[in-house]
Image: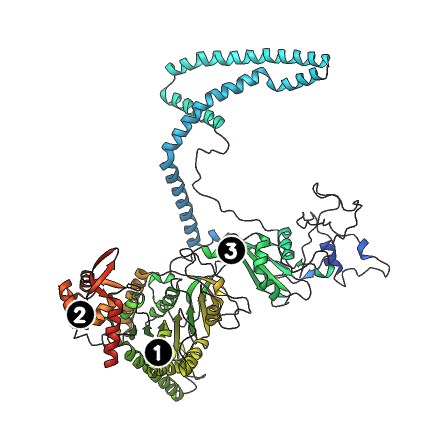
Amino acid sequence: MSTAPRYGTPPDKTPDNHPDTSTDKRETNVVDLAAARIRSLPDNHPDAGPDSNPDTEPVIGEVHEGHFDVALDDEPQTGGAIVDALPLRGGTESTGSRLPIIPPNLSGWQNVKATIEDAVRLAAHISAFHAVRAPWYAVQVAFWALVGVPVVIGHQLRWWWLVEQFGLRQQAAADNDAQVWLRLHREVKATRRWRGIVLTGEALALAIGAPALWFLAPTWLLVAILAGAALLLARIARPADRSIVAKAVVTGRFRRMNPDIVLRAYYAAGLGNPDKADKVITFATPMSRDTTGTGSQVAIDLPFGTGFTHARNARAAIASGLDVSVHQVFLTPDESSERRHELFVTDRNPLAIPAGRSPLLDCQPRDIWAPAPFGLDERGRNVWLDLMWISILIGAQPRKGKTFAARALALFASLDPYVRILLADGKNSPDWDKFRLVAHRAVFGTVPNARDNDPVRHLVEMLTEVKKHIEDVNEFLATLPTSECPEGKITRELSRKYPRLRVWLLVMEEFQVYFELDDQETNKEIAKLLSYIMAVGPSAGVILLSSSQKPSGIGAGDVGRLFNRYRDNHAVRFALKCGNRVVSDAVLGGDAYQEGFDASALPSARNKFKGIGILYGATDETPIVRTYLADHGDAENILKAARRHRERAGTLSGHAAGEEAPREVRDVLADVAAIYSHGEPGLHWQHIAARLATTFPEHYADISAETISAQLRALKLPSVNVKVAGETLKGLRHKDLTAAIESRQATA
């Protein structure tokens, strides 16, 4: 237990800008917060008699109207409220939190080495920074030195003439005080005589010494004297706000947090009232810096009847009262009391600080049974995600980092050579293309394309294979003795020992497109398979990783019901920036908004806040996570390493092992459809020919614009005028190509 901090001004030290209210004749109702908090405890005055008046009891300090930020007492005082201390990081309640004997940056050779490297890098940066700007520094010094010559002469003349006494003599003359005027006049004459002699001596010394130094002094001494004189003159003449030497390192600045500001914010948010004794807000712990050094924290006790829900709903108002961004204010409930919570205010918006490159870039093997590195939370702490036994839903607006977040988890799984990866990319983008290096099965798109000539049929076959695997796992586990499988489920040892018990990862990118195909029977079949896998897959070691930019309003009837069941049964949800609250609720779940989590309220600057989302359901906490970055090139390097790990372990299978038969015939419609970028209404024939030759050189290396035009016109596709980048030439409209593919499917 510890004594609560007492905030107040000692009685004998009343601030100048706050008059002593004890002598104020106005009738006021000033609440002494420190005293009120002490008086609220029944056992705080054990010796008080029945006639004692708590309002006249001596208190430590005094709090004035509208002011709560005051100096702490120099010496400990008796009394005070007993509160629960925050958990200690080392030590005990009696010894307190112990600081390390050896600073962390000097503990161990690795830390010492890193500290030295940081110091060397800083010194090198500062040296290089100033070396580049040295010529400009010299020009500025020369300029201000020239300006400094008349400035110094002016200072000397004013010093000699004693101009500061002029006002005194004028005042004496105005007062008709001849005696004072004569005394001042005599003093100024004597002072000017003496200072004139000094200036004459300076002038003679300069007139004689300068030529002597010029002709007799060695060059190095002359240069040193001139440089010193130039620096001195420049320093005298330079304005105070015009620094010659620029700063190579800018020290971070942050808004100061103190009890005054915190109480002002909470009272402004309507969470309490300082004029009512039962509505006073108190502090459960002293205000301190966070252990990460990124912000300030303090435990707050709200008035009785006010709980964490009220504070959470008033988060924006609290941020306004603190004069910071709402994304810098974080509230954490306390397990011991509903009205107590921890306030954490970061120095700057943590969401604007990227988490950095993925730690998977070391390309070392990983273990799916260990947590996966996902990113950093608002306090800069690592966020790890256990993938086993769960299903994960990731949702967001387009281009907010949804695919990158899903791919980061899939990359972690790929580095475990004993994880079998199955992929369905509904949007048929290049983001997942390199996963063919390791994927057991890979499906791309919903219509025939260059990478998949029948994606819908292949998806059904893949999901059927997953269902059959789940059934086989459960049957096989039932045959194992309890000595080997005591809990009736997969363990790490069993998954390594028996290939039938390998962990499977099913990735469903933009899964909603497979619920809204033209063929309703196929929609139902896919929906049933996914619902089954969602229900029983995680217990059989099948991890589901789903992502969608449209997680609601899909399908009708049984398809819509199964879609909602599949979406809602994900155990862990990660919502990046969403377009509105409805979409956020669809991703995070219906209860998330009532708990204060709304992904539509995340910042939306396009190039500043990518990869930021709310991680819901993974732990008791719900952090805002900045995901690690692994771009397209990083993903390719990681997947190449993952393939090497699998080759050494002998676990390559399916498409990655070459089981897929190579394409023997050309599907020109699918090939042309594959080269169109999203949103392109049409292309010129020469552009189509060039892209085909680049994308499929084995079939179209020598294709010409006339040849591809003839082939497609033979398939009843019109050659029309197409405007691209302001130029109109003959080409093919994308809608005509789509219509031809749909017509062929309907005929088949």
Identity, as a three-letter code, of the amino acid under mark 2: Leu
| x then y, percent, for residue 355 | 42, 58
Q: Residue at x 63, y 67 (%)?
A: 338
The residue that disc 2 covers is 712
Q: Earlier in the sequence, mark 1 or mark 3?
A: 3
**Residue 582 or residue 533, whichever sits in front:** 582
Q: Is residue 513 visible?
A: yes
The residue that disc 3 covers is 292
Query: Can you tell which quarter of the image residue 556 is in?
Result: bottom left
- Describe the element under mark 2 as helix, strand or loop: helix
User: Gap in Å between the C-alphas at discs 2 and 3?
Assistant: 63 Å
Query: Can you tell which quarter of the image residue 741 is in?
Result: bottom left
Q: Earlier in the sequence, mark 2 or mark 1?
A: 1
Q: Residue at x 50, y 18 (%)?
A: 153
The residue that disc 1 covers is 502
Q: Is residue 500 visible?
A: no
Asked if residue 626 is positioned above or below residue 212 in the image, the reply reads below
C-beta proximity under 8 Å, tags 1 and 3: no
How many other residues sit within 10 Å of disc 1, few (<14), some (14-19) or many (≥20)? many
Specify the color scheme.
rainbow
